[in-house]
């Protein structure tokens, strides 16, 4: 038997998610049965999507979370001790899986030298989301003006860089002067707007008087409405996330001005990564050389210890994080 520290959901948030929605408990995990194996959690991705899961969790559940772990105590023919696996391992130090139904996982065969945490962001769901959603749905053309919200985030920062490489003028919206400076000076976008300190509609009017060709939406709400007001004919809006609306409020805001898209024959299309499992590997292969050569700038913020998981979520939701948020559970030498 293994005793594993685990974060248990005690309540769903009323408004913004808070530390009080969780309790840290020590759980006794039994030995794996025949056909099962143990997984020691190594690192957990914490993102705005975590709050979507929290909003639908039941009190007593171990908090859901995508993570990478190492197989231990295996009694499964397909998984041996030491294998790295990725899946919805949750906010716990240790768990049991059968590889399929009971916590489905996939083996992580990373090339030598590749940081495994990159599988939690740029070479994982957020990087693949950025790539497919931008190119399939945003369809950027040389000379287009591309607007990206949550631009310094995990998805947004990759979208910005891919759009720039595609020959577009890129405007990013982010929540601090530090993030805006990073976007302009390190990531290399054309303009950045600090939505916490600046008037977004006024800045958009000044920066793109000709309008927006592609709006990559990670936040929804007022920012989505401001972008819709400034779309050019034939523009594409990619609905990827709505972080400003993830606070459990009953009524989601807007967009009240959607009908202005009709005479412009503009498009608005949702994207969800769950429909793209078949393209994960191919897209990862496209991103990998850009990451390993340093052509794509990747910013990750690691908090150490399972104890930090709720704090990581609160930081992501307030924008206090700077970079893809990862919680390293153990093995600080490999993570
Ligand atoms: N559809 C899909 O398949 C898919 C896949 C992955 C992610 N997503 C969605 O894409 C979005 C971005 O995900 P991510 O993992 O890359 O997260 P992320 O952008 O790295 O998330 C953290 C950032 O969101 C910003 N933020 C937090 N609260 C905000 C608010 N109220 N208004 C505006 N910005 C806020 C903060 O940056 P600032 O300091 O700039 O505010 C924070 O640093 C999320 O909505 C996520 O759910 C969708």
Image (spheres, rainbow, N blue to C red):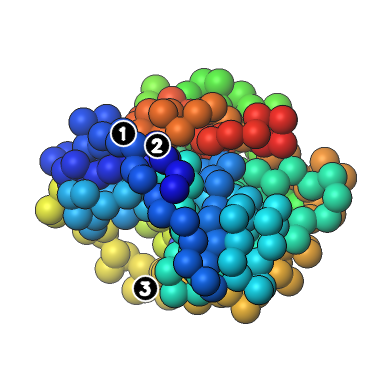
| Gap between marks 3 and 2 measured at Cα | 56 Å
Front residue of this view, candidates 220 and 321: 321
Place of residue 6 in the rendered image (x, y in percent of width and height, measured from the top left)? 37, 40
Label 3, ligand 1: CB separation under 8 Å: no
- Dividing the picture into quadrants, the one containing residue 280 is bottom right
Residue at 58% in and 42% down: 42
Q: Residues within 10 Å of mark 3 (few under 14, many from 20)?
A: few
| Gap between marks 3 and 1 measured at Cα | 54 Å
The answer to whether residue 158 is left or right of residue 18 is: right
Place of residue 15 in the rendered image (x, y in percent of width and height, measured from the top left)? 17, 39
Q: Residues within 10 Å of mark 2 (few under 14, many from 20)?
A: some
Image quarter (top left, top right, bottom left or bottom right) of the C terminus: top right
Place of residue 315 in the rendered image (x, y in percent of width and height, measured from the top left)? 40, 29
Q: Which residue is mark 2?
A: 5
| Gap between marks 2 and 1 measured at Cα | 7 Å
- Dividing the picture into quadrants, the one containing residue 333 is top right
Tell how many labels.
3
Place of residue 92 in the rendered image (x, y in percent of width and height, measured from the top left)? 43, 44
- Report whether residue 320 is seen: yes
The answer to whether residue 272 is left or right of residue 263 is: right
Q: Which residue is mark 1?
A: 24
Residue at 24% in and 44% down: 9
Q: Which residue is mark 3?
A: 263
Front residue of this view, candidates 4 and 226: 4
- Report whether residue 319 is seen: no
Q: Which badge, 2 or 1, comes first in the chain's sequence?
A: 2
Q: Residues within 10 Å of mark 1 (few under 14, many from 20)?
A: some
Ligand 1 occupies quarter? top left
Q: Does the residue at mark 2 contact the one at mark 1 (Cβ under 8 Å)?
A: yes
Residue at 55% in and 21% down: 178
Q: Which badge, 3 or 2, comes first in the chain's sequence?
A: 2
């Amino acid at each position: 038997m293994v005793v594993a520290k685990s974060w248990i959901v005690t309540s769903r948030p009323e408004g913004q998610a808070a530390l009080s929605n969780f309790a840290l408990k020590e759980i006794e995990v039994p030995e794996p049965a025949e056909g099962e194996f143990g997984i020691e959690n190594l690192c957990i991705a914490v993102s705005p999507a975590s709050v979507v899961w929290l909003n639908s969790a039941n009190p007593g559940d171990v908090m859901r979370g995508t993570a990478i772990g190492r197989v231990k105590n295996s009694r499964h023919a397909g998984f041996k001790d030491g294998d790295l696996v990725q899946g919805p391992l949750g906010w716990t130090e240790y768990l049991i899986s059968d590889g399929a139904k009971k916590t489905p996982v996939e083996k992580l065969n990373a090339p030598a030298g590749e940081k495994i945490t990159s599988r939690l962001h740029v070479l994982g769901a957020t990087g693949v989301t950025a790539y497919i959603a931008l190119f399939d749905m945003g369809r950027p053309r040389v000379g287009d003006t591309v607007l990206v919200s949550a631009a310094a985030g995990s998805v947004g920062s990759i979208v910005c860089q891919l759009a720039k490489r595609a020959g577009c003028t890129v405007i990013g919206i982010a929540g601090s002067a530090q993030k805006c400076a990073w976007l302009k000076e390190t990531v290399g976008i054309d303009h950045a707007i600090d939505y916490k300190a600046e008037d977004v509609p006024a800045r958009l009017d000044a920066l793109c008087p000709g309008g927006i060709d592609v709006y990559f939406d990670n936040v929804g709400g007022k920012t989505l409405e401001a972008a819709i007001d400034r779309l050019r004919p034939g523009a594409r809006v990619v609905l990827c996330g709505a972080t400003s609306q993830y606070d459990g409020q009953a009524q989601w805001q807007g967009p009240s001005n959607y009908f202005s898209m009709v005479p412009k024959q503009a498009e608005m299309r949702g994207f969800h990564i769950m429909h793209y499992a078949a393209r994960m590997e191919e897209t990862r292969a496209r991103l990998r050389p850009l990451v390993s050569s340093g052509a794509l700038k990747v910013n990750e913020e690691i908090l150490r210890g399972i104890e930090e998981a709720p704090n990581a979520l609160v930081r992501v939701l307030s924008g206090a994080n700077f970079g893809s948020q990862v919680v390293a559970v153990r093995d600080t030498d490999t993570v």
